[in-house]
Image: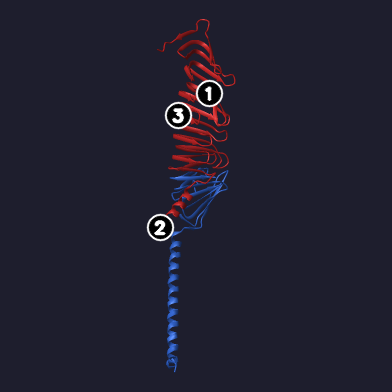
Chain colours: A blue, B red
Amino acid sequence: MNLFLHINKKIIFFFGLIIVFSFLIIIFSKQINIKNIDLKISQKILSNVDIAEPKFAISADSRKIHITAKEGNFLNKDQILLNKNVRFKSNDFSIETEQVIFDRNKQTAESNTKSLFTSKNTTIASDGFNIYDNGNKIMFYGNSLIVLK
Amino acid sequence: MRLIFCITIIILFSFNIIAKEIGETEITTEDGIEVFQDEKYYLLKKNVKILSDNFNLNAKDVKIDFDKSLYDITELNAKGEVNFVSSKFGLNSISESLKFEVNIEKLRVSGKNSELITKDIKMYSDGLIEINNLSGDFKLEGPNSKLINETIFINAEKIDGIFSNIGDQKKISFLNVIDKKISYVKNNNTEMYAKKISFDNETSIIELIDDVVIIRNGEKIIGDYGTLDTKNNSYKIKSNNNTKVKVVIQNNE
């Protein structure tokens, strides 16, 4: 006679039930933990960021430079620290970097992180930059590389 | 073996990334760039290196003027230990400062110990050296200005003239040499001194004006005006009314 016919059906049923329950408990507890972590992270981000996806502009008579970023924090009444995917875009050029201090009053922007300037047939890689004089003047800091095509 | 292969691939890949592509101009600086968009120029600061298809330039600081956008270079001004090498124009120069007007291909180097060397001609000056690649005009001004080629040596305060391209060689077709003290020209076996010396390749005549001295084959002829025909190697000397032509025959023994 087959050995499996000797096993009690009730025992198999309870054993299966225990496995299913324990499996559900594990999944459930993990989900709770993940939710907690997500919640903690989002709470942390929300607590540190003053403006999510801020948008500003430097305006001059001849040009307008649009500024976007993922995060922004007020340093004081006029200065805002822009963080992550900071992008300056005008009709003539764009600049990408990770961190910029934008002054709303003076209409200046300064960065000390690696920056990439792109315009028609031109790229400039530098260790940072300073946009001043209503966007007319741009100073690129440190070791810089220009490629003209 | 596998490691060596991997290293080789990485090195080749790195070179491919670093290497300048044809048609590109690559500029590096150690202390940044300042772009003036309305004024249409940018300043390159400290140990500037420019690599392009037409020329290479090294200098302490460079100012670049542009027309429509940054790539559209019209004029280049370099200062401090300037070293310019151009395969297109077949010349190289060393100077304290340099100005290059791109559209008219006009190059001007200036400062103490400036030198501009082409395949056929060497030019030196403590003032300025200017050469226009399109028109062939050239100019040297200032102390210790010298122009040297295979057959001629010129030393004067001001030398200007026109080069003409004969085959792949640059020949002097017109020359004007001025020095308020005295100009010096040595052509083959003839030495000439005068305040003003000019040469026209069409007539093959060298004209000497004021305080003229011609020295050749042990003869020294002194006068106020002289001409030397480079075709038949003959010369004439005149004097003003109050002076006389003087001939000194030197004994070389």
Res A36 quadrant in image: bottom left
The first of marks 3 and 1 along the sequence is 3
Looking at this view, is B57 or A53 the one in front?
Answer: B57
What residue sits right under mark 2 in the picture?
B3
The first of marks 2 and 3 along the sequence is 2
Distance Cα–Cα, label 3 vs label 1: 16 Å
The image shows residue B106 at horizontal and vertical percentages of: 54, 32
What residue sits right under mark 1 in the picture?
B160
Locate residue B241 relative to residue B144 in the image: left or right: right
Residue type, mark 3 in image = Ser
Looking at this view, is B58 or A78 the one in front?
Answer: B58
What residue sits right under mark 3 in the picture?
B114
* Pointer 2 local density, CA inside 10 Å: few below 14, some 14–19, many at least 20: few
Distance Cα–Cα, label 2 vs label 1: 62 Å
* Pointer 3 local density, CA inside 10 Å: few below 14, some 14–19, many at least 20: many
Quadrant showing the N terminus of chain A? bottom left
Looking at this rendering, what residue extends furthest in the bottom direction?
A1
Question: In front: mark 2 or mark 3?
Answer: 2
